[in-house]
Amino acid sequence: MVKKKCYTGNNVQKGAAYSDVKTDTAVQNRRENMKKYDYLIVGAGLYGAVMAYELGRKGKKCLVIDRRDHIAGNIYCEDVEGIHVHKYGAHIFHTSDKKIWDYVNQFAEFNNYINSPVAVYKDELYNLPFNMNTFSKMWGIRTPQEAKEIIERQRKETGITEPKNLEEQALFLVGKDIYEKLVKGYTEKQWGRKCTELPAFIIKRLPCRFIYDNNYFNDRYQGIPIGGYTPIVEKMLEKAEVRTGVDFFEFRKENPDVAEKVIFTGMIDEYFGYQLGALEYRSVRFETEVLDCENYQGNAVVNYTDREVPYTRVIEHKHFEFGKQEKTVISREYSSEWKVGMEPYYPVNDEKNNALFEKYRELAAKEKNVIFGGRLGNYKYYDMDKVIAAALDALSELL
């Protein structure tokens, strides 16, 4: 197994410094001697880092803490065999917002990586997203008109007019072949339940491109930062004091008045002690290994869409930066149900959970001098560009 290498920059302190408190007197002395900050930022991920950077530019004193033993949240990259490994899954920066693209490029130079995943179904391999390369392989055709006719015929053959679940929704949108080979098994692994048991609204659309184009995203700007994402966050946090391995709830007990305001990017339901019940999330785990070969699968991201393969995809990290190293590092990605105490990845934004979140948001509005943000604080899935935009929008109200 790959041994972890954590960032410990000059402004980062390990949280263990707080574990040597022996007496109530020592705790009181620490409180009295603790520096006063303008902001305590809980979470050293992208949202918290943008906040710290912009507040620092305005002369605000920020303390950033994170429960993990490293900065950068889910975009954290570690160096293994000279390869920048995306520890928490593939992250490809993409946006159509030039303002956001220019903003992030001040912290790093981006390469010209284009996300072009492939899908493996049993012994068949298909290009993604659904485009003419996909349709040509699936049906032995060449023209867009042929593809449109097959999809339309299969859609009509379903007889579905008002989809009642995700399976019916997908069949209604793209027909039987695409659904059964490229949607069904992958989706069931992601959500841990059958497509017939999932609500239709999870898939609002399944775009089909009738051109030969394997670029997964439609955005104008796209790439991977040369050197990985961690250096971006390092630069954002240069003016802040950063402490990793620190649990906010324990820290708050010892230091209740450490800052004028708190920016909380953790789970909003956990902040309130799950008093209204726990929101639901999906979790992800990774099996990462170093292989003694130069090139394992020939692509950064390969999805496995049949249900029998337990993992959803395999990531080969070197391809994000066109690596030529003698060895390679792969990560098998498994989706799983989330339980309290596990690492949350994706909010389950169905009607039930969104209604519960609204109740938590009402509680949050009553919290004095606490700002909730980020993927977990706002209970919302964000692409990276949207995280930056959300942070900048929140800052416009603070400053």
Image (cartoon, rainbow, N blue to C red):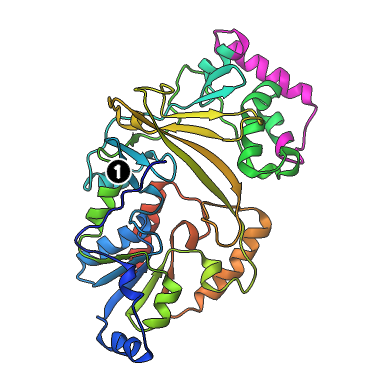
316 is higher (above) or lower (below) than 88 = above
Query: Is 63 colored magenta in this rendering?
Result: no
Magenta residues, start to end: 138-167
Q: Horizontal and vertical percent for residue 325? A: 28, 27
State the image quarter where residue 27 is shown: bottom left
Residue where numbered disc 1 is placed: 101
Instruction: Say left or right for 290 vs 189.
Output: left
157 is higher (above) or lower (below) than 23 = above
Q: Nearer the viewer, residue 146 or 57?
A: 57
User: Residue sitting at 54 percent across and 68 percent down?
Assistant: 270
Q: Nearer the viewer, residue 241 or 359?
A: 241
Q: Main secondary structure of the magenta part?
A: helix
| Whether residue 369 is visible | no
Q: Nearer the viewer, residue 216 or 242?
A: 242
User: Residue sitting at 66 percent across and 19 percent down?
Assistant: 151
Q: Horizontal and vertical percent for residue 355? A: 65, 63
